[in-house]
Image (spheres, rainbow, N blue to C red):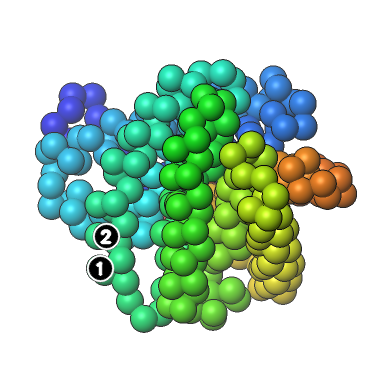
Amino acid sequence: MSPFPGSGWWAGLPPAAGAAVMALGIISVGLHLTGHEVVSLIALAFSGALWLVLAADFTARLLGDRRRFRAEADTPAALTAVAATTVLGTRLSALGWQEVAIALLVLAAVLWPGLLLSVVRHWRRRMPGVAFLVCVATQGLAVLGAVLATAEHLDWLAWAALACFCLGLLLYAVAFARFDLREVVGGAGDQWVAGGALSISALAGSKLTASPVWTGSAHTVLRTATLVLLGVSLAWYAVLLTAELRHPRPRYDIRRWSTVFPLGMTAAACLSAAGPTGAAWLRPLGEVLLWIAVAACLFTCAKLVTSRRRPTA
């Protein structure tokens, strides 16, 4: 039981529900980058509202159900708390709400080390795609840190973001070594995080490339790394999409939000990288991928609604 009065359906939401915040948040970012501000704000409103619900439930479990909190904190899905907070903060920063974005960065940075260590201690040999959330959460810190470093002219924060970027890449390699490649064909949706983790890495790289802190060879290295990461993430996109078409899984599963998020993140990474890297062709590609992500989001929402309405036996 939750110690908070009025708790209801949200008390049953698993940590994986944080992927819905991430999906809606990054789609809002993509819509903002393409000038669809009204729709972007609608997506942001849903993302922010769900974040508040999950934050309240997170606090309730921490204070009133420590056994359940510890059990869920051991799972990779717990890191959606960090990733969702950074994605939301990134979008709010684009609105000019820098103080709120800074507060969210601090919150995410406080949550990150404890959850990361707890998750890594409980890794198995063969893991589903959710294992890559160790990279996603870390790169989320890099993205928001780099965005705020530029907005607030904080060079030290840019260096901290660079450190998170490098650590995120290392964590991706570690997660890949434990990833069960059979998930590409049989996964329930979170197998897409294998590619989405590289997309958010490319997004972090694009924000670092755009920073005035690095010039000359350092800028060239960041630009090259961003393009390589984006290229590999697009290759993952093609492989995972092919697997989906050959082995369709139409039933709703909450892990499908972990499909929508990488779709939106790949689009946002292309849109964001086009300017700093000088690869103008990435923008039209990002626009196409964005509408695919929007369609996937609407489809997942529809599946969620119909699954709730379906009578139980």
Q: Residue drawn at (13%, 37%), measured in percent from left and top?
A: 63
Q: Which residue is mark 1?
A: 121
- Whether residue 168 is visible to the viewer of this picture, yes or no, is yes
* Cα distance between the residues tagged 1 and 2: 6 Å
Identified by mark 2, the residue type is: Leu
Q: Quadrant of the C terminus?
A: bottom left
**Residue 44 shows in this picture:** no
Q: Residue at x 12, y 38 (%)?
A: 64
Query: Could you say where residue 31 lies in the image, as x and y percent from the top left?
Result: 70, 32
Instruction: Name the kind of residue labelled 1 in the image.
Output: Arg
Residue 33 coordinates in the image, percent (x, y): 72, 32
Per the image, the residue denoted by label 2 is 117
Residue 277 in the image, given as x and y percentages of width and height = 76, 48
Residue lying at 20% horizontally and 49% vertically, measured from the top left? 69
Q: Secondary structure at mark 2?
A: helix
- Closer-to-camera residue (306/27): 27
Q: Residue at x 50, y 54 (%)?
A: 165
Circles 1 and 2, Cβ within 8 Å, touching? The answer is yes
Q: Relative to residue 308, is residue 295 drawn left or right?
A: right
